[in-house]
Amino acid sequence: MLKLSKKVEYGLIAMRHIASVNNQISTVKEISERYSIPSDVLAKVMQKLTRGKLILSHQGAMGGYTLARGAHDISVMDVIGVVEGTQVGIAQCFAETPENCSIYSNCTIKHPLGKIQHNLEQVFASMKVSEIV
């Protein structure tokens, strides 16, 4: 069964939280305690979201994170791509490159799966962080 990784889930939870507090500065500690997320894992996810320019890091005693742009401008697909480094693939040939699949040239289901993959990508790309708040 296709499922999102825990890191993606944590990233979406964090993005949702920041958006729900009207983009006020939120800390890893605040988010991890509120949602029972391991703070060390969340900190790494937040670093990825910062490097991916989805959130901004504010340094200092009153520091934390805010969204880099409006929640309506950030898609679930953006979060998946930044946190995982790849997009969601329903089969190996979609998660990686077709050359990495040993049966790709003889595969009889790659085209139907390709349609499912396309639809899944469209759903994730069209769903915005603002919709999960």
Image: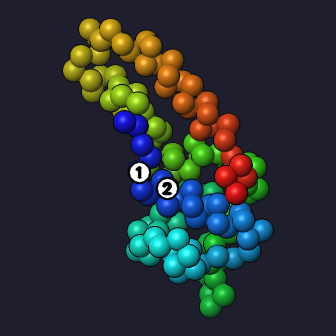
Residue toward you, 7 or 82 = 7
Instruction: Answer few, some or many: residues within 10 Å of disc 1's Cα (few below 14, many 20 plus, some between 14 and 19).
Output: few
Instruction: Answer few, some or many: residues within 10 Å of disc 2's Cα (few below 14, many 20 plus, some between 14 and 19).
Output: some
Task: Name the spot of residue 42 as percent of width and height, x first.
Answer: 47, 69
Q: Residue 5 carries which label?
A: 1
Residue situated furthest left in the rendering: 102
Task: Name the spot of residue 12 as percent of width and height, x first.
Answer: 57, 56
CB atoms at circles 2 and 1 under 8 Å apart? yes
Q: Is residue 82 visible to the viewer in this orientation of the structure?
A: yes
Q: Is residue 101 above or below residue 133?
A: above
Residue bearing mark 2: 9
What amino acid is labelled 2 in the image? Glu
Rendered image coloring scheme: rainbow
Direction from residue 128 to residue 39 in the image, left or right: left
Q: In which quarter of the image is the C terminus?
A: bottom right
Task: Name the spot of residue 34 as percent of width and height, x first.
Answer: 56, 76
Residue toward you, 42 or 44 = 42
Q: Which residue is drawn at 42% across and 56% down?
A: 6
Residue toward you, 51 or 26 = 26
Q: Residue at x 44, y 75 (%)?
A: 39
Quarter assignment of residue 17: bottom right
Q: Residue at x 48, y 53 (%)?
A: 8
Quarter assignment of residue 95: top left
Element type where label 1 sits in the image: loop
Quarter assignment of residue 70: bottom right
Element type where label 2 sits in the image: helix
CA–CA distance in space, label 2 to label 1: 6 Å
What amino acid is labelled 1 in the image? Ser
Q: Is residue 50 visible to the viewer in this orientation of the structure?
A: no
